[in-house]
């Protein structure tokens, strides 16, 4: 970590320094405004303006309660993070320092909170590009290769055969409690902290943790390859009564230079493959981001589309939507699948119920006739009823039982009454659940429905496009 001070304060005019005045309180600078993090893969990229600059989730969280740095004038911090050895070097420059009432922030421990022992001085950092150029190869040699595919440059057509001179991409599976994998993950933690919203390190000593690595192998000679890490996912294996287990994806990250190239999809499909081969109960994801959830629905819709048991059920729902007029119905409309189908999909595809139902809606949408206004309106009505039910049933069981908080003079956290709706069917009123008058409530509901319809249409479009342009890759990793 290098410190550079711009200018020399000793050259200031002594007379000016003797003047008396009121010093302004240091307002500080937000960490996100003065820190930049770059990913580099060789020495030449260190300090180069063309290096890949990443956009961290929130750098401010590492610098006190207000996320600010105090005591520096024109502070700039450039952090260079190697994607070869995953060490880091911080170059710090400023014009001057001074206590403006808030002290002077000690930058070294703050940066070490992010980068830990991977933070090196410049000379040692530069040496890692040659000294540890085979680090990833040596680590992954102890793992299990789940699948291998040709590397496809963005915008290029797929090549289904493996050329000996072409780069390949492997998904490698490793146990994190094994020392090599655990050490690698400890170097990846800064990426988790910087790029995964709410990310925190997992316990590498727990034997139930695994890591799936996306590794690019570039032939350098007839006997040697250069290894690059493109992304990774951490997965935890839970016990499921009585004699099974379930997988939970905790963190999934594709490095910024390699995003939008299908590697996230490959990671999810690799986990799906392991779940099926080892007959786990199902797969869940810990607090998925909006995009990750979008990707999961896309992948699971593709799987369900080619899953024979779903075809008859989808056709039945489509016939129903063509024939009825749900806008004049007396009760809630439903277009859900048979309960038995949900269980079959869980057993065969390891898709949990909640995930199945979201993918099911996209699958139904794909089979709708866009020229049939009744059919499309009926589908929208079903989506509206589902969203309305989620609002009304928030925190309640699906069997008509509801908990309603009531104000009392005692502890409000344990003050509630339990009510049962007549015949197990809850009312349609949104009053009390969505703020505002009836007109405002309807507007809010319409906005939610429109957003959901747009998301479903977007995923369906991507599924349709994928099937047309890349059908040969169906079933691959």
Image (cartoon, grey):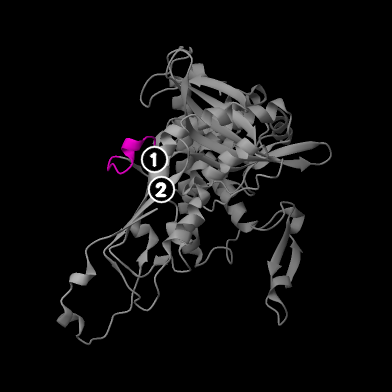
* 297 or 333: nearer the viewer: 297
> Is residue 42 highlighted in magenta?
yes
Residue picked out by circle 1: 126
List x then y, in percent, for residue 430. Answer: 58, 61
Q: First in sequence, mark 2 or 1: give its number.
A: 2
Question: To which quarter of the image does residue 185 belong?
Answer: top right
Residue 256 colored in magenta in the image: no
Which is nearer the eye, 472 or 217? 217
- Whether residue 52 is visible, yes or no, is yes
In this view, which residue lies farthest toward the right? 242
- Horizontally, is 14 left or right of 303 in the view? left
Quarter of the figure with the C terminus: top right
Residue 96 percent coordinates (x, y) = 28, 67
Q: Which residues are magenta?
A: 41-50
The picture quadrant where one finds residue 148 is top right
Q: What's the CA distance linking mark 2 and mark 1?
A: 9 Å
Cβ atoms under marks 2 and 1 closer than 8 Å: yes
The residue under the point 73% across, 73% down is: 415
What residue did someone put label 2 on?
89
- When the figure is inspected, residue 346 is found, relative to residue 286, above or below; the finding is above
């Amino acid at each position: 970590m290098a410190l550079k001070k711009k200018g020399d304060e000793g050259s200031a005019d002594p007379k000016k320094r003797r003047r008396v005045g009121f010093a302004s309180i240091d307002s500080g600078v937000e960490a996100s405004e003065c820190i930049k993090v770059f990913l580099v893969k060789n020495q030449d990229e260190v300090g180069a303006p063309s290096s890949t600059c990443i956009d961290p989730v929130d750098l401010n969280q590492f610098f006190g309660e207000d996320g600010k740095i105090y005591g520096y004038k024109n502070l700039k911090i450039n952090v260079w993070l190697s994607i070869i050895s995953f060490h880091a070097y911080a170059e710090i420059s400023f014009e001057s320092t001074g206590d403006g009432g808030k002290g002077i922030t000690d930058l070294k421990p703050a940066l070490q909170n992010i980068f830990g022992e991977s933070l090196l001085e410049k000379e040692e950092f530069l040496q890692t590009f040659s000294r540890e150029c085979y680090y990833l190869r040596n680590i992954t040699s102890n793992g299990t290769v789940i699948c291998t595919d040709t590397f496809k440059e963005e915008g290029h057509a797929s090549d289904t055969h493996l050329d000996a001179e072409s780069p390949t991409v492997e998904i490698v599976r490793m146990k994190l409690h094994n020392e090599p994998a655990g050490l690698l993950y400890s170097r990846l933690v800064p990426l988790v902290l910087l790029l995964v919203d709410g990310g925190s390190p997992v316990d590498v000593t727990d034997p139930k943790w695994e890591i799936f690595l996306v590794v690019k192998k570039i032939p350098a000679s007839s006997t040697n390859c250069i290894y690059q890490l493109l992304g990774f996912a951490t997965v935890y294996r839970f016990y499921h009564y009585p004699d099974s287990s379930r997988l939970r994806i905790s963190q999934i990250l594709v490095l910024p230079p390699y995003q939008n190239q299908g590697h996230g999809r490959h990671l999810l499909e690799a986990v799906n493959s392991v779940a099926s081969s080892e007959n786990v109960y199902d797969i869940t994801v810990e607090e998925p981001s909006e995009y990750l959830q979008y990707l999961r629905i896309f992948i699971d819709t593709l799987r369900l589309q080619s899953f024979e048991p779903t075809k008859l059920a989808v056709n039945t729902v489509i016939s129903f939507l063509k024939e009825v007029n749900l806008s004049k119905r007396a009760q809630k409309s439903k277009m859900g699948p048979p309960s038995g189908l949900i269980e079959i999909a869980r057993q065969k595809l390891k898709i949990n119920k909640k995930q199945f139902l979201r993918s099911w809606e996209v699958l139904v949408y794909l089979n709708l006739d866009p020229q049939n206004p009744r059919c499309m309106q009926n589908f929208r009505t079903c989506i509206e009823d589902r969203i309305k039910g989620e609002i009304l049933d928030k925190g309640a069981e699906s069997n008509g039982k509801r908990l309603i908080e009531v104000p009392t003079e005692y502890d409000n956290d344990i003050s509630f009454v339990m009510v049962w709706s007549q015949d197990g069917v809850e009312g349609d009123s949104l009053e009390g659940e969505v703020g505002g008058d009836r007109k405002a409530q309807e507007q809010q509901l319409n906005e939610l429905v429109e957003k959901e319809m747009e998301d479903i249409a977007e995923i369906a479009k991507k599924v349709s496009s994928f099937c047309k342009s890349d059908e040969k890759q169906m079933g691959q990793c």
